[in-house]
Image (cartoon, rainbow, N blue to C red):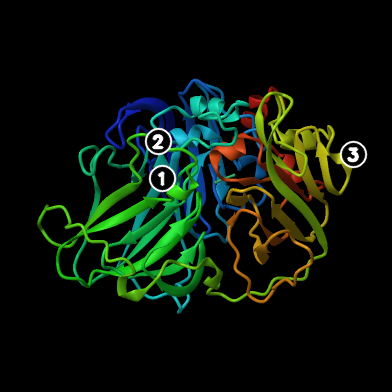
Amino acid sequence: PQTRTYNFTISQVTGAPDGVQRSMLVVNGLYPGPTIEANQGDRLVVNVFNQIENATAIHWHGLFQNGTNFFDGTAGITECGIPPGQSLTYNFTFGEFYGTTWYHAHSTQYSDGITGALIVYPTASNPPSIPKYDQDLVVELSDWYHDFSTDLLAQYLSPDGIQGTPGNEPVPDGGTLNGLGQYGAAGSGGTYFNFTLEANKTYRLRLINTGSFTSIRFSIDNHTLTIVEADSLLVEPINVSGVTLAVAQRYSVLFTTNQTSGNYWMRAELATDMFTYTQPGQNTDIRGILKYTSTDALPTASDDPGANGLGDLDTSLLVPAIHVNAPESTVRYSATVSFQNTDQGKFLAFLNSTSWEPLAGTSTLLAVRNSSGFAEEGAGISSVGDQLIVTEDRISVIDFEVDNLDDGDHPFHLHGHRPWIVGAGAGRYTGQPLNSTNPMSRDVILIPAYTYVVLRFVTDNPGVWAFHCHLSWHMAAGLLMQFNSLPSVSSQFDIPQAILSQCGAS
Ligand code: C2O
């Protein structure tokens, strides 16, 4: 194993990813930020210098942080945030983890541009079910706003809402593919990201939805895509014409440059059915170019819908390539998802009756260390103030039932654990049979409107871990709860002084 060291400077700059200038937040002046590459088992050291006006923290999405919960980068939960002008060195190992993932600020700051890809290569050879490929490429897809996230968030949380309707999420102006979009009438604004490829080779595209709100459908004109990885997990190959990524989800797709030599569109289409109002001038048809010819001509528009008669990915068909059965559960908890205007004069999101707000002046991890309010509650599910928290001080197998009572779809993400999806269906969970035979597992689970999921996971990773809707507006509205696994394992409180100082603690 090696140590991979990166220096990240977070700053505010003027940029125009889709041709329209705005103020944005970036890592090392780049949007998206630099791609981190490492091998399984490596150590990652990232020196983060905060040069913006507010505190920030960087979360390493989908990693386990086993023994280093304090480096999870969840503002308000595992740290108070790096104050302006200061720095923090994140330092942890990947352990057994490998796959496609990303990093981002753990707040709506990521909507302003603090995101980047994180790729961890396996040190063992790929399982035989994964076809060989010649080259590996990263494609970061995102919706994109022309306004600063704090302004959009204030409108969203206001009791009147956006356009007079509480609950209308901010609708993006457009989107980006590897940091480039095209705003305005087709092709008149922005530029196209492009890859120059060779004919008759097989490429792996690592697709990541680094956006804030909108699901995005990815396809390549005239080319079949073979799905081989979902959220850092290798899956049995499935051929599709396109794949839709909810926010924070990832897929690897293989494709072969086997068409007539030429230029082809990569398409990133925003899911406009999620929008509750019309954003004038909006561009929802984001494109990039695949070239396997020397000409610079734009591809001729043809989208060959359903290449080779294939459809979009049906996520219920995903099967882990390495078969594992889930253990039987030992304990069950449940939560409901809902939204409402509150008597504090704010539109907020609720898990059960709790709408998350970070603790004032401390982190949950420190509060647990100091036993202020949490330890007394003991094991089980409890609401302490604005915190809904499940405490398990033994290695348990939780069945966590989530009932989405809302009319929107929510991509929920669990930190520090890898949940199996053992049940999903329409309506509320009322004891329907569960599947523990090689169930799919992923770290971002889309829970459609008025449906339930049952997630099963093992509380074997000490620390305080967020479970939240990854839509940045919803997390900010309070759609976040926490799991506190094994609070009696004291090593999780060996918190570096730099993190304690953020909260004024020692
Ligand atoms: Cu991708 Cu809680 O984060």
**Nearest to the observer: residue 461 or residue 301:** 301
Which quarter of the image is occupied by the C terminus? top right
Left or right: 370 as drawn, with respect to 241: right
Marks 3, 2: nearer the viewer? 2
Q: How many marks?
A: 3
Residue behind mark 1: 142
Tell me what residue is drawn at x 61 percent, y 51 percent: 412
Residue behind mark 3: 376
Disc 1 marks which amino acid? Ser
**Nearest to the observer: residue 168 or residue 387:** 168
Residue behind mark 2: 279
Mark closest to the chain's N terminus, 1 or 3: 1
Dot 3: what SS?
Answer: helix
Residue 403 in picture, x, y percent from top left = 71, 54
Up/down of 480 relative to 300, above or below: above
**Nearest to the observer: residue 132 or residue 399:** 399
Mark closest to the chain's N terminus, 3 or 2: 2
Proximity of marks 3 and 2: CB atoms separated by less than 8 Å: no
Mark closest to the chain's N terminus, 1 or 2: 1
Badge 1 density bin: few <14, some 14–19, many ≥20, Cα 10 Å: many
Tell me what residue is drawn at x 69 percent, y 44 percent: 338
